Image (cartoon, rainbow, N blue to C red):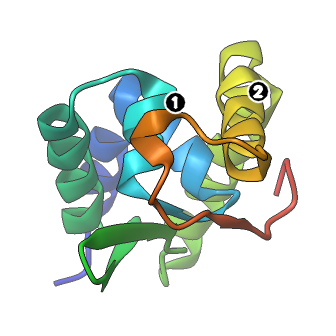
Amino acid sequence: MRPDLVTLFQALGDPTRLRLLNLVAAGEVCVCYFIEILDEPQPKISRHLAYLRRAGLVTARRDGKWMHYGLVTPQEPAQAEVLKTVLRVLGANPKMQRDRAALERACCAVRLPASLQNAPRPELTRARNA
């Protein structure tokens, strides 16, 4: 089932989901990094990621015990344009910029926080304000 505009806007209507989308716009990210950066409990993060998956905005990939999430661009041109605009606006938001900087620091740190010691590092491939 392809999500409709109502589903898309509902998915975009939550601050936590917007923060998650901002982070996956940088590339595929392990859920443990979301927990660390957003400082939210795992069940809350997982619930919002599941919502984004149902809306068709993120994809999930399991690698052993790790779950990785990546951005999905909707096939419907109008929905793709809405997402592109939202991501551009998020990229200009100071709070979202801090989240992205925290992700970049965490993934590139020589010494990771204890909660991320064994976690796979994200590969940040997308442009900052893509």
Amino acid type for the residue under numbered disc 2: Gln
Q: Residue 103's spot in the image, x, y percent?
A: 66, 41
- Whether residue 114 sits left or right of residue 78 in the image: it is left
Say if 75 sits above or below 81 in the image. below
Q: Residue 110's spot in the image, x, y percent?
A: 78, 47
Q: Nearer the viewer, residue 57 or 66?
A: 66
Nearer the viewer's eye, disc 2 or disc 1? Answer: 1
Residue situated furthest top in the rendering: 94
Q: Which residue is mark 1?
A: 37
Q: Which residue is mark 2?
A: 97
Q: Which mark is residue 118?
A: none
Amino acid type for the residue under numbered disc 1: Ile
Q: Compare marks 2 and 1 and give the one earlier in the sequence.
A: 1
Q: Secondary structure at mark 2?
A: helix
- Whether residue 119 sits left or right of residue 91 in the image: it is left
Q: Residue 92's spot in the image, x, y percent?
A: 82, 27
**Distance in Å between CA atoms under marks 2 and 1:** 12 Å
Q: Nearer the viewer, residue 21 or 63?
A: 63
Q: Residue at x 79, y 70 (%)?
A: 125
Can you see residue 11?
yes
Q: Residue at x 26, y 65 (%)?
A: 53
Say if 84 sits above or below 20 in the image. below
For the C terminus, which image quadrant? bottom right
- Whether residue 85 sits left or right of residue 12 in the image: it is right
* Label 2 with label 1: CB-CB less than 8 Å: no
Q: Residues within 10 Å of mark 2 (few under 14, many from 20)?
A: some
Q: Residue 72's spot in the image, x, y percent?
A: 49, 74
Q: Residue at x 22, y 27 (%)?
A: 41
Q: Residue at x 16, y 84 (%)?
A: 1
Can you see residue 18?
no
